[in-house]
Image (cartoon, rainbow, N blue to C red):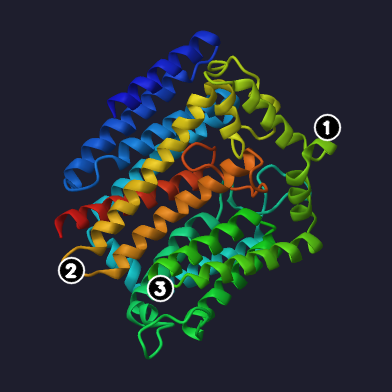
């Protein structure tokens, strides 16, 4: 946490020196420092056996993201500060509820129905805060406050799937085993195939009615990886990849937004000043950053549209360079490694608790897959999906749900240490 505080302080001083007229820089520092100190102290008191790396790590990433938002879109920085306070409080509430994991498992069907109702509500009543005609309507609004129902649905689906797969764990592990004890390669029973098709169907609904390619892919990939962990059945990955390919081909033929993202992924240079302008500017930002970067507020990442949200990774690359990019990737690598370490400790604990293990795997996988999708999309390694970079990008609902997910991981890590 001290290292994170030093990084935040140095960069805020540099940002203030570059533009002395900015009056919210030190407010940002005060908000971040308060959240860091109070959050760290209370988390240590509430869960003394938690993984001590998780909270400082997400505060570091969130603080870095705040600096980027203050640099790129100062009007949004104040809102993000408020969401950081709310998110920190929400994380502490999760840590203070000793039975929250039991409640998530016991009320999984209620939560699932609620989450799906929010999704249907978004399809019927969704809006877009930007007000642009034809833009995806992925938000529900209450006055001037907007949130994306797909964000809490991530945790809800992971909790539901972990609970379901935990109950089916012995049967899933026995699937595909013949009478000689050898695993049949291509045998997939309805016990496995049914949930796969169900989740594939939900993902297709999200894609068709909301045109939310990123969320649809995220839901299905997380489910597929979670089911693979529970069953150990390798053909699931092949079958899932085929379903994704089929959905991609159909979506390319039917939906202009999918066709656009595939076309500019294959060759953006044909329309560098048109439909592919955003990805081309992103690639130029990476090139301009070099190894050490232009320096904070010294580059021109504002040429990248929506740089404070979907493309904040490109802005970080231009002003912090390759070293900054490696640091961001390293942060997510540490987060994923610590999450999987929690899952591994739970799986080898004296008390076998498949739900806790699978829940830790699922939450960690959400972070890993989402970060991979957006970083790969900004670098043109995969088609753009439109998801945010967790903790870094502007977005209140994304930050809030990410903090809650880490809070759940911290509680799981505490239980793992006490087993």
Which secondary structure, mark 3?
A: helix
The residue tagged 1 is: 273
Q: In this view, does 346 lie above or below 84?
A: below
Quadrant of the snapshot with the C terminus: bottom left
Query: 42 left or right of 400?
Result: left
Contact (CB < 8 A) between labels 2 and 3? no
The x and y percentages for residue 75 are 58, 28
Q: How many labels does the image show?
A: 3
Q: What x and y, as percent, mark residue 55? A: 31, 40
Quadrant of the rendered structure where residue 270 is? Answer: top right
What residue lies at 66% left-to-right and 41% top-to-bottom? 380
The N terminus is located in which quarter? top left
Q: Mark 1 or mark 3, which is nearer the start of the sequence?
A: 3
Residue 180 or residue 249, whichever sits in front: 180
Q: Are there few (<14), some (14-19), or many (20+) residues within 10 Å of tag 3?
A: many
Residue highlighted by disc 2: 351
Q: Is residue 176 left or right of residue 256?
A: left
Give the crowd class for mark 1: few <14, some 14-19, many >=20 residues within 10 Å. Answer: few
């Amino acid at each position: 946490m001290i290292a994170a505080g030093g990084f935040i302080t140095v960069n805020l001083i540099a940002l203030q020196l570059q533009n002395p007229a900015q009056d919210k820089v030190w407010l940002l520092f005060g908000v971040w420092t308060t959240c860091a100190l109070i959050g760290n102290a209370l988390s240590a008191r509430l869960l003394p056996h938690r993984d001590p790396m998780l909270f400082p790590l997400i505060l570091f990433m969130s603080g870095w993201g705040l600096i980027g938002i203050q640099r790129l879109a100062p009007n949004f920085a104040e809102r993000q500060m408020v969401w950081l306070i709310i998110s920190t409080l929400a994380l502490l509430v999760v840590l203070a509820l000793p039975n929250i994991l039991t409640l998530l498992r016991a009320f999984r069907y209620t939560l699932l129905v609620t989450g799906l109702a929010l999704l249907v509500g978004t399809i019927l009543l969704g809006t877009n805060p930007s007000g642009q005609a034809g833009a995806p309507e992925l938000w529900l609004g209450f006055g001037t406050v907007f949130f994306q129902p797909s964000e809490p649905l991530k945790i809800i689906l992971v909790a539901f799937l972990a609970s379901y797969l935990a109950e089916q764990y012995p049967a899933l592990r026995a699937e595909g085993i013949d009478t000689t004890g050898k695993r049949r390669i291509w045998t997939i029973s309805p016990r496995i195939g049914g949930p796969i098709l169900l989740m594939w169907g939900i993902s297709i609904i999200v894609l068709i009615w909301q045109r939310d390619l990123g969320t649809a892919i995220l839901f299905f990939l997380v489910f597929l990886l979670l089911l693979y962990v529970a069953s150990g059945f390798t053909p699931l990955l092949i079958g899932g990849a085929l379903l994704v390919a089929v959905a991609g081909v159909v979506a390319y033929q039917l939906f202009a937004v999918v066709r656009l993202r595939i076309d500019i992924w294959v060759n953006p240079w044909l329309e560098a000043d048109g439909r592919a302008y955003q990805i081309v500017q992103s690639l130029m930002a990476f090139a301009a950053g070099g190894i050490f970067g232009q320096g904070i507020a010294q580059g021109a990442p504002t040429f990248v549209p929506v740089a404070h949200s979907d493309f904040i990774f490109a802005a970080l690359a231009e002003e912090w360079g390759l070293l900054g990019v490696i640091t961001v990737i390293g942060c997510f690598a540490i987060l994923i490694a610590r999450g999987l370490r929690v899952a591994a400790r739970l799986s080898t604990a004296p008390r076998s608790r498949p739900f806790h293990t699978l829940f830790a795997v699922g939450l960690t996988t959400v972070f890993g897959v989402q970060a991979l999708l957006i970083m790969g999309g900004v670098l043109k390694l995969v088609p753009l999906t439109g998801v945010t970079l967790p903790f870094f990008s502007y977005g209140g609902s994304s930050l809030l749900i990410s903090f809650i997910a880490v809070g759940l991981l911290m509680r799981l890590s505490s239980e793992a240490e006490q087993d």
